[in-house]
Image (spheres, rainbow, N blue to C red):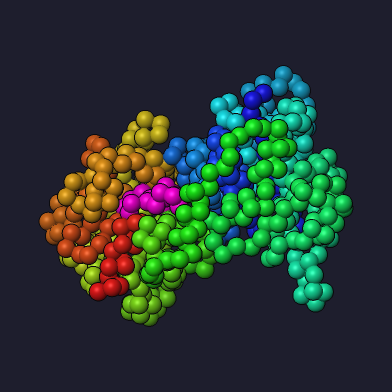
Amino acid sequence: MRTKFIFITGGVLSSLGKGLAASSIGALMESRGLTLSMLKFDPYINVDPGTMNPFQHGEVFVTDDGAETDLDLGHYERYTHAKLSQKNNCTTGRIYHTVITKERQGDYLGATVQVIPHITDEIKRTILELADSVDLVITEVGGTVGDIESLPFLEAIRQFKGDVGKENVCYIHLTLVPYIKAAGEVKTKPTQHSVKELREIGIQPDILLCRTDRFLSPEIKAKIALFCNVEPDSVFTAKDVESIYEVPLCFHQEGLDEKIIEILNMWTKAPDLGAWEGICRKVKSPKDEVTIAVVGKYVNLRDSYKSLNEALIHGGLANDCQVNLDYVDSEEIERSGTGDGISHADGILIPGGFGQRGIEGKIEAIRHAREHGVPFFGICLGMQLAVTEYARNVAGLERANSAEFDPDTPHPVIYLMQEWVNYQTKTVERRDEGSAKGGTMRLGAYPCHLVRESRAYEAYKEKVISERHRHRYEFNNRYREPLTQKGMRISGASPDNELVEIIEIPDHPWFLGCQFHPEFQSRPWNPHPLFREFIRASLAAKRK
Ligand code: GLN
């Protein structure tokens, strides 16, 4: 077999940055000219994270093919060029769903269906499915070693080595080496125990990545190596860094990529890390800064807006400026009734969202941006509310609303389109209020045609673009006429002109709303044009 496999597990506790570690390893391997695919296993029963509360689970990341995936896939896409789809994120629920479906179809010919081998075989099949055309498959196992939930995944990756040969597999374990102030030293015991647990289930890690706040001394590395049965040069410091984009460079300085290719017995060209060095230089020495108010509901959890935050930072990179994010709770705006919380911002952004809470506060923030010439960027729900605000306060359509929030509104400027063409499946979908909560979302990449005279075209400089969606409600075409007559510009629509995708206000410094989620496609080395232009406009507004 040509393809090699890296497995990344995590120990001691969650939030050590396993997703970022996996992504950074991917970036390093690509910098050596290797092609790769990335896979995330999530040990929960939900079939996908689409229905999970972003408070608990963080953002739902959407791929081109419309898969609703774990936010780690966002990191994978931002750090590597791996093409990700439904196949690259798999939960316990999906594995069981597949196995139970096969069982019901009689595929197991009367056998007793068990965790070993049926569940583990399905897990291994999922990994192998990605191996066809790439040099390397990097698989991250979610959860922490020791959890009951992740056991079948760990058992499957243990078996995997036997299946494909030991020279083709590298196990990397990310653990914590805390510094204990009272003792004045770093402690290795949690790592020892975590590795012990891993070895009990039959996995001997090849490499230990030790998350810590300082570089580990050769003595500490030697101690960890001795207790954990790895070579001293296989223990690496994964030191805390200021910017997540430093991680690949830090790993490289420690010699991690060199060790991995040695273990996998591979030959590659020397790594070219120029792009990452450039990104880090820009992150570290910005020439200016802007403050962007992000007005939303899940304001106290940064993970809910992961890709958005990154895309804003990328927009800053494109303008040599640091972007300070100010999360404003829209309910706070409702309570105070004024734009107090946002008046200091150089730009205002309303991200995607679901549900009634805080809607009027967001509309108030949009009015503030429109009336005061503050650069405004509305994404998905943010665009829908910008349309609502314009309908109410400029076009005089009283009580205009999205049917999502007021089913009885006399002016449903945003509504459930009853028939629409699903671009992913190329079928006509029908829906009504009753089907609203089902799997009727518009998901994944759709083409969009841009109007030449527009901010959108100025940004993209292309006539046809492709962007990712995740929403149910749409712009109501009945209101095209009344709104455009009052000065709103529709600058992007589906090829058949049925779906309004971008709206703008031409006589405003920069006011744009899009029905899609541009943040999913922004990359540090290739900042998204709309974020680039939004930050540029915010910077200009600040300098005025
Ligand atoms: N709630 C809105 C809809 O379903 C917007 C969704 C979103 O912002 N992602 O259409």
Q: Can residue 530 be seen in this view?
A: yes
Image position, residue 64 (x, y; %): 44, 39
Q: Which residue is drawn at 81% across and 60% down?
A: 220
Query: Is 282 or 397 nearer to us in this picture?
Result: 282
Can you say which quadrant of the picture contains the C terminus? bottom left
**Displayed quadrant of residue 123:** top right
Image position, residue 428 (x, y; %): 34, 33
* Residue 195 belongs to the span the image colors magenta: no
Q: Residue at x 42, y 42 (%)?
A: 443
Relative to 220, does residue 2 appear above or below in the rendering? Answer: above
Image position, residue 305 (x, y; %): 48, 59
**Displayed quadrant of residue 165:** top right
Q: Residue furthest top?
A: 109
Q: Residue at x 48, y 59 (%)?
A: 281
Compared across the picture, whether 302 is left or right of 177 comes to left
| Magenta-drawn segment | 514-530
Compared across the picture, whether 151 is left or right of 525 comes to right
Q: Which residue is drawn at 13% across and 60% down?
A: 486
Q: Is residue 123 visible?
A: no
